[in-house]
Amino acid sequence: MNLRDKLRGLLVRLYARRVEGHLDHAQVPKHIGVIMDGNRRWAKAAGSTTVHGHRAGAEKIEEFLGWCSETDVEVVTLWLLSTDNFDRAKEELVPLLGIIEDVVRTLAADGRWRVHHVGTLDLLPAGMQRTLKEAEESTADKDGILVNVAIGYGGRQEIADAVRSMILDAHDKGVPMEELADSVTVDMIGRHLYTKAQPDPDLVIRTSGEQRLSGFMLWQTAHSEYFFCEVFWPAFRKVDFLRAMRDYAARHRRYGG
């Protein structure tokens, strides 16, 4: 590392410390959703492989959760694999599934987080399904941040699954379809989402410069605030996180008003 890079790093750390010092913890989001985008583009820019980019992105996760634990964040939802990702070439998808499974094991072994899967289990290999179940069971009594791992997740699919669950639940209870139709409410559908009983995301962060949700938590983000960051996920720094928190704290939330 040359002198210029060292000075740049020092200035970034000093700036991050200044931002952190002015952060109002009373205005911290309780639930943060993260669209971790840019692994492949980061790897390409570095002259490396896509698999290396996914590994670098995976390594960033625990660092990010550490930053969250220094504030009053209670829930973090990490979008690790979308339903659309299953259309990727086998030579990319297979290693990616292995990397994601390692992420789940690492989070469970850390001892600080409660791990909860959100997504469609049927799309996932049997081994990953077992890993997710074991991670949820082994961390159920942890007091730290609730970490939703969105794997095999799609926002439209979640809503479809919620409606299906609601209908099946009514059928099991012998509720006539006409009565069910009359009783459908926003709250009722919400009770059948993957994130039932959790607060909706206050803040959604997306890296890589893209400014769209791509189907992320379509139902839950109706009143969320968004922070779009230019850097690729593997290069996401604490100063970027603090900027997102500062930006959120400065907003006047209208909740659709």
Image (cartoon, rainbow, N blue to C red):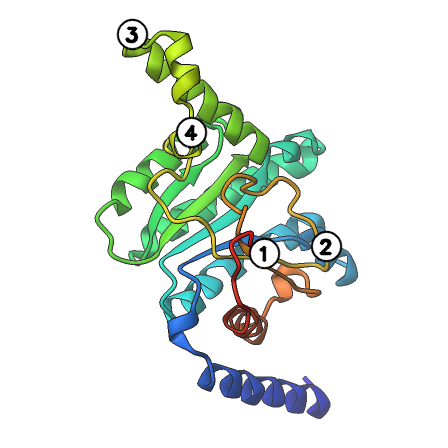
The mark that comes first in sequence, 3 or 2, is: 3
Q: Closer to the N terminus: mark 1 or mark 2?
A: 1
Badge 4 density bin: few <14, some 14–19, many ≥20, Cα 10 Å: few
Query: Is residue 35 left or right of 125 when viewed as pictured?
Result: right
- For marks 1 and 3, the one nearer the N-term is 1
Crowd tier of the residue under label 3, counting other residues whose Cα lies within 10 Å: few below 14, some 14–19, many 20 or above? few
Image disc number at residue 185? 4
Query: Which of the two residues, 67 or 94, is positioned nearer the viewer here?
Result: 67
Name which residue lies at 62% across and 85% down: 9
Check disc 1 and report its element: helix, strand or loop: helix
Q: Nearer the viewer, mark 1 or mark 4?
A: 4
Judging by the rendered image, the residue that carries numbered circle 2 is 210
Mark 4 or mark 3: which comes first in sequence?
A: 3
Q: Amino acid at mark 4?
A: Thr
Decide: marks 1, 2 in contact (CB < 8 A)? no
User: How far apart are the alpha carbons under marks 1 and 3?
Assistant: 47 Å
Q: Earlier in the sequence, mark 1 or mark 4?
A: 1
Report the residue at 71% width, 54% height from top.
211
Q: Residue visible at 43% across and 68% down? A: 28
Query: Disc 2 marks which amino acid?
Result: Glu
Give the image location of residue 123, x and y in percent. 53, 25
**Which residue type does callout 3 highlight?**
Gly
Q: Is residue 246 above or below residue 161?
A: below
How far apart, in angstroms, are the residues tagged by discs 4 and 2? 33 Å
The residue type indicated by label 1 comes to Gly
Spatial separation of the CA atoms under disc 1 and disc 2: 17 Å
Q: From this viewpoint, is residue 91 visible?
A: yes
The percent coordinates of residue 94 (x first, y second) are 60, 35
Determine which residue is flagged by label 3. 174
